[in-house]
């Protein structure tokens, strides 16, 4: 199967199923050729799409069936063909290829032109989980619905919002598609899951609007002989190292003793099973061999077991290292592993 964008009368092959409302696409499935038409596509694009579809058919002897598909009227057969390429996205754009970005150091390329996007993930309109698609909706709190999941693509971050009444299929697909977005940029950002009612950070991101850019890139100050000396530089230069009058030889036993002392401090400040150091409301279990399973319902489906940072469990104080906790997407129980 091949996917083409109709661009100035010609077909440009694309690899990601991102459909823009202002364009026309041709999906060539050998025996069937689909012409997908966006709601805002121009007349000349519709005409060019039909002509290119006939040309593809004639090149193979005219045996293919040509079907026109309007936006939001996609048959299940069409969606099943698209599914192996990834999540079908319908976005409010005129040229879909401008959405595909490359990764560079720090921020990903094109971050300056980025507009935040909110997608709705709902299963009620489709026959099965493999025929679902992502629909772009306005980037506002009013777009949220308790019966659906939503994926917010913030450029450097991907957020997943789960409504209180959403079903398992929507949670699974929202998670899969969020990870696909992350993979498209070589892991330039991390996906995070928010549940309705515990979503203040997600709602704050929506309130900042489509143009807000939150960068995790760090710029380091370069040293140069041409830079004028600052007051801070002079202060640092005046600090002299302290020397002890008595110097003694360090033995292997001294090193072992120091290591054990550091371990003892780290263990006393945090760690599973130590009273007062972690959130006791979360179940703590022994880590088992093999596939991770839910301690309550027993599911081993890795798509249903969500991993997140457990900030109540500080493993190391400096540098600060947190433990992990897990949540089952089927029964909702949370737990950590020793």
Image (cartoon, rainbow, N blue to C red):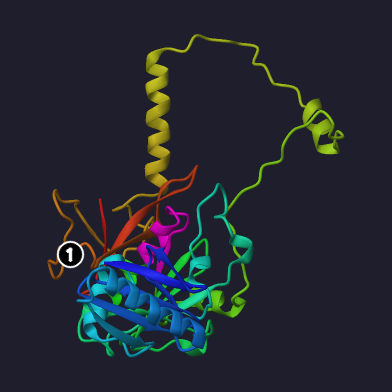
Q: Where is residue 336 in the image (x, y as percent from the top left)?
A: 27, 58
- Count of all numbered marks drawn on residues in the image: 1
Q: Which corner quadrant holds the N terminus? A: bottom left
Front residue of this view, candidates 11 and 1:
11
Front residue of this view, candidates 335 and 156:
156
Residue 318 located left or right of residue 224 = left
Residue 54 located left or right of residue 236 = left
Magenta region includes residue 239: no
Q: Position of residue 74 (x, y in %)?
A: 30, 86
In the image, residue 297 above or below residue 320:
below
Quadrant hosting residue 310: bottom left
Q: Which residue is drawn at 43% across and 54% down?
A: 187
Q: What element carries label 1?
A: loop
**Magenta region:** 178-193
Q: Residue at x 35, y 81 (%)?
A: 35
Q: Can residue 281 be seen in this view?
A: no
Q: Is residue 277 visible?
A: yes
In the image, residue 59 above or below residue 337:
below
Mark 1 Cα-neighbour bin, 10 Å: few <14, some 14–19, many ≥20: some
On the image, numbered disc 1 is attached to which residue?
301
Front residue of this view, candidates 114 and 262:
114
Q: Position of residue 63 (x, y in %)?
A: 19, 76
Q: Which residue is drawn at 81% across and 26% down?
A: 238
In the image, residue 338 above or below residue 225:
below
In the image, residue 217 above or below residue 28:
above
Q: Residue at x 47, y 13 (%)?
A: 250
Q: Where is residue 280 in the image (x, y as percent from the top left)?
A: 32, 63
Magenta region includes residue 187: yes
């Amino acid at each position: 199967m091949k996917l083409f964008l109709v661009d100035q009368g010609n077909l440009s092959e694309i690899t990601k199923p991102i459909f823009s409302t202002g364009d026309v696409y041709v999906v060539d499935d050998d025996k069937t050729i689909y012409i997908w038409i966006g709601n805002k596509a121009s007349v000349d694009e519709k005409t060019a799409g039909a002509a290119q579809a006939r040309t593809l058919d004639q090149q193979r002897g005219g045996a293919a069936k040509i079907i026109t598909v309007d936006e939001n009227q996609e048959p299940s057969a069409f969606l099943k063909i698209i599914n192996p390429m990834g999540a079908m996205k319908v976005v409010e754009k005129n040229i879909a290829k401008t959405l595909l970005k490359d990764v560079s150091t720090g921020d990903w390329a094109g971050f300056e032109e980025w507009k935040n996007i909110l997608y709705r993930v709902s299963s009620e309109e489709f026959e099965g989980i493999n025929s679902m698609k992502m629909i772009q909706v306005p980037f506002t709190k009013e777009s949220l619905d308790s019966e659906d999941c939503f994926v917010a693509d913030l450029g450097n971050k991907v957020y997943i919002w789960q409504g209180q009444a959403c079903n398992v299929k929507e949670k699974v697909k929202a998670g899969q598609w969020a990870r696909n977005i992350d993979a498209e940029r070589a892991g330039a950002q991390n996906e995070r899951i928010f549940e309705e009612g515990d979503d203040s950070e997600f709602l704050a991101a929506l309130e900042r609007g489509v143009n807000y850019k939150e960068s995790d890139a760090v710029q380091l100050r370069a040293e140069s002989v041409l830079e004028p000396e600052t007051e801070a530089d002079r202060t640092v230069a005046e600090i002299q190292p302290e020397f002890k009058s008595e110097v003694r030889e360090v033995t292997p036993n001294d090193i072992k003793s120091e290591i054990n002392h550091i371990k003892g401090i780290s263990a006393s400040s945090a760690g599973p099973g130590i009273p007062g150091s972690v959130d006791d409301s979360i179940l703590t279990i022994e880590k088992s061999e093999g596939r991770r399973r839910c301690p309550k319902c027993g599911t081993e489906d890795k798509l249903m077991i969500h991993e997140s940072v457990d900030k109540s469990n500080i493993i190391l104080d400096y540098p600060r290292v947190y433990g992990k906790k897990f949540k089952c997407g089927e029964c909702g129980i949370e737990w950590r592993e020793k």
